[in-house]
Image (cartoon, rainbow, N blue to C red):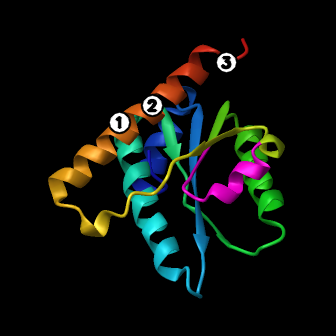
Amino acid sequence: MRWTAKELDMYSQSKEYVDTVLISLVPLSFGGEMKQTGSMNEFLTILSLEIEKQMKGRILLMPSFQYLHNEKDKVERLKHWANEAKENNFKHVFFLTSDYEWKKDERELENHLIWIPAIPLENLEIDQARGMIGQQVLQILDIFTYNWKNEKK
């Protein structure tokens, strides 16, 4: 389910089945990395929407967590988002990013960080892009399934 009024109404009616939150981590940059961060945003948006479509009724897709590349308190802000989700009965919080910098904070995040390199979609044919996104979605769904099966009872 997506973070829209209509879908949040559906969520309210079926809370007991939706136990997972997915948050995309999207960097912002206004310098020389602007195009690269824009490409990451495009890729993560499409990827997370496809994941949500595949897992509708089990996952709540949160709005993207946006941060400046050089931001000092981004980890604390993100941990606050995750804690808020957990306090509201979500068992699993997954973070999806193409920014390798998050790998150094992975342990501090208690939750599940999924790093996947961004595919620059602007140079691909539509069918090629769909195929590549589809492959990525399947890999990520395997990660979700593994974690759901191995959750602490």
Locate residue 100: give its quadrant: bottom right
Q: Is residue 118 above or below residue 114?
A: below
Residue 77 in the image: x percent, y percent? 78, 61
Q: Which residues are magenta?
A: 95-106
Residue 132 located within the stretch drawn in magenta: no
Residue lying furthest top: 153
Residue at mark 2: 141
For discs 3 and 2, the disc positioned in front in the rendered view: 2
For discs 2 and 1, the disc positioned in front in the rendered view: 2
**What residue do we see at 77% from left, 51% from top?**
104
Residue 28 in the image: x percent, y percent? 60, 76
Residue at mark 3: 151
Residue at mark 1: 54
Q: Are circles 2 and 1 on residues that touch, CB within 8 Å?
A: yes
Question: Given the image, on which type of amino acid does mark 3 rest?
Answer: Glu
Q: Give the class, few, some or many, for how many residues have Cα within 10 Å of label 1's Cα (few <14, many ≥20).
A: some
Q: Secondary structure at mark 3?
A: loop
Residue 103 appears left or right of 116: right
Question: Given the image, on which type of amino acid does mark 1 rest?
Answer: Gln
